[in-house]
Image (cartoon, rainbow, N blue to C red):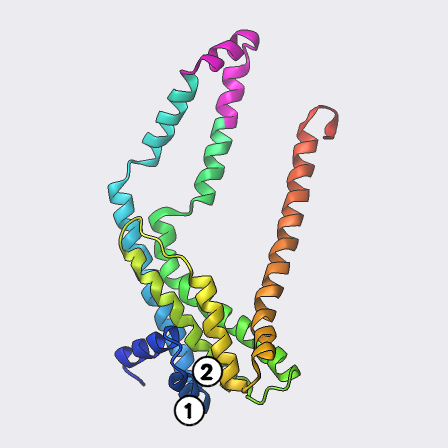
Amino acid sequence: MQSVLSLFRLGIDGILLNPLAYRDQRDSPDGLRRGFVLVVMIGLIVGSATLIGDFGEYVAQPSTAAITKTIYDGLRAMPWYAQVTTVNPQFPVQFDQIFAQVTQIVQMVSGGGIIGSLVGVITTPLIMVVSWLFFGTAGHLMARTLGGRATFNQTLACTALASGVNLLSIVQVVPFAQVSGTLLLGLVTSYVAIRVAHELPPWRTFWATMLGPVILALILIALACVMLVLALGALGSALPGGSL
């Protein structure tokens, strides 16, 4: 089993687009296993860094209850609140119900706090492994269709280096710190991985690299459309007359 330090260096080579590292992964009989361990290791590192950063944010920022109460009191103190209450005496009750619903939605969207971060230490490696397998499989199938010569194991061994981009997310160990540009860099590293593995010309490599992201984008668009239709249906049912 390779040391953590050597795997970390392998991930850095992936970020730096070192062609020797990609060729070594392609030609090594141990490349697939090494790639799997690399992806899991990076997931654990990133998940742990996120946990530490989120804990720092939790300690530094005001409590959710205090923030919610400040916003609630501020809205009720505005002139429009008194004006609407004068016209509709039932408005305070309606306002409290709407505010509670909005607060719940915001809390759900903003994440699970420290508990969510603890769970993330486990789920982050799993998500990274699934992503690696999904994009690696899509890229391999497209590359083979376009004349690529690498085996499935060789493709996965090389594309595992693309996950090295996630090492940049270690910066999240600092509270409130964020990292951007990993998506574009991830596509670049995946491009290099597929090109080295399959020895394809540039444009064929490009299309093989983009198949996975295109499929994922279409799935997300379809899910967004379904959610929008459901939301509009629920809103229509809530309105007088049962329709928008």
Q: Is residue 62 left or right of residue 95?
A: left
Provide the secondary structure element on which disc 1 rests: loop
Q: Which mark is residue 157?
A: 2
Inter-mark Cα distance, 2 to 1: 9 Å
Q: Earlier in the sequence, mark 2 or mark 1?
A: 1
Quadrant of image for the N terminus: bottom left
Residue 151 picture quarter: bottom right
Give the magenta part as a residue range. Answer: 77-98
Q: Where 156 sits versus 185, above or below?
A: below
Give the residue pinned by disc 1. Answer: 28
Q: Is residue 78 magenta?
A: yes
Q: Are marks 2 and 1 in contact (CB under 8 Å)?
A: yes
Q: Residue at x 66, y 36 (%)?
A: 234
Disc 2 residue crowd, few under 14, some 14–19, many 20+, Cα 10 Å: many
**Residue sitting nearer the eye, 102 or 158:** 158
Q: Looking at the magenta stretch, what is its main secondary structure?
A: helix
